[in-house]
Amino acid sequence: MNAGTLFALGWRWGGRLPDWLRRGLSVCVADAAWFRRGAGVRRLEKNLVRVRPDATPTQIRALSRRGMRSYLRYFAEIFAMPSLSEAQVDARVRAVGHEVVVREIAEGRSVILALGHLGNWDLAGAWARRHIGRVTTVVERLEPPSLFEAFTRFRSGFGVEAIPLSSSGADVFRELVRVARNGARVIPLLADRDLTAKGIEVDFFGERARMAAGPAALAVASARVLVPVVVYYERLEGARRRAAGTPWGVVLDFAEPIPIPADLPSAELVPHLTQAWVTVFEGLVRQHPEDWHMLQRVFVSDLDPKRDASVRAQDGASA
């Protein structure tokens, strides 16, 4: 049974399980993975050391355990999402600082959102589609193809248009520019790691890290607003908890828009804007490190220099 089949079964049956049982299973799986201390957990801890450099090894271990529980909570939640009512989605999401985005959409302009792998961004997308505007994003092609198809069906089920990240990144970017310029779309792009070997090196928690250029490049090319956003978990209480049907909700936290400088050379705009949104993102991750689901390499010092050089050379030849 491959990953695509497992995820399809999760979406078929996940919503039929009681919330307490789904949550309990996710905690068990998270703790099992954490105790096993595989490569993903070790990588998560290396990333968290950068976020909390003053923490002791014991504190980092405790933080990574909370991080794995947050990560598996995301999967438990998305398996139940197809069965959620609109009222339940509304009760689970609390938006902060989204007035600028609402205003831009109301005036017929798209907004580019720079996101990281925090909280439940799919739940936030379902809420945004109903309360802010049409949502278009780019999704990584997953293996096996059945897993990618399952995720595509899942996201289209709550109204999110997904453009597959193909081998021709230029084609995807042209489509994004077309979408951004024509009409009013919310365009969230997960960008806290580089998937294309064309990433921008930035200062991140005192080290060099490589982030995706997409949000900044799209904002420049389309002349649309760029807004950093994070999604993190919060405990629910009282009437909201009863309406949500679960003790956990998410906060969709919009930062101030990143201005595009008028006095910079065009070649410097994308690096400048990328560093600007990453600096905002860094501060928000520092506040909610347990919800940063980053089990991959982000920092340049963690990359294999030979492999990285080879990937970049191949990508440059392809381009």
Image (spheres, grey):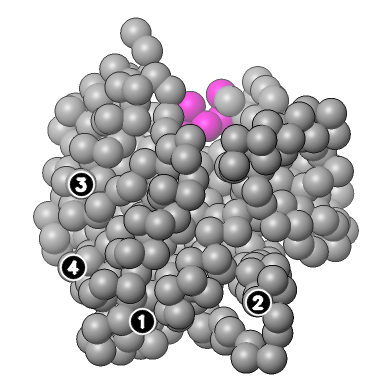
Q: Which mark is residue 156?
A: 3
The image position of residue 109, as x and y in percent, is 31, 81
The image position of residue 222, as x and y in percent, is 43, 74
Magenta highlight: main SS: helix
Label 4 vs 3, first from the N-terminus: 4
Label 1 is placed on what type of residue?
Answer: Val
Real-space Cα distance between discs 4 and 1?
Answer: 14 Å
Label 2 vs 4, first from the N-terminus: 4
**Which structural element holds mark 2?**
helix
Q: Which mark is residue 130?
A: 4
Q: Which residues are magenta?
A: 27-32
Real-space Cα distance between discs 2 and 4?
Answer: 36 Å
Label 2 is placed on what type of residue?
Answer: Ser
Which residue is depicted at the point 60% across and 35% down?
Answer: 318
Label 4 is placed on what type of residue?
Answer: Arg
Label 4 vs 1, first from the N-terminus: 1
The picture quadrant where one finds residue 73 is top left
Classify 10 Å Cα crowding around label 2: few (below 14), some (14-19), many (20 and above): few
Viewer-nearest of discs 2 and 4: 2
The image position of residue 129, as x and y in percent, is 23, 65
**Which structural element holds mark 3?**
helix
Identity of the residue furthest to the top in this view: 1
Real-space Cα distance between discs 2 and 1?
Answer: 25 Å
In the picture of the structure, the residue carrying the numbered disc 1 is 101
Real-space Cα distance between discs 2 and 3?
Answer: 36 Å
71 vs 311: above or below: below
In the picture of the structure, the residue carrying the numbered disc 2 is 266
Classify 10 Å Cα crowding around label 1: few (below 14), some (14-19), many (20 and above): many
Which residue is depicted at the point 32% across and 85% down?
Answer: 104
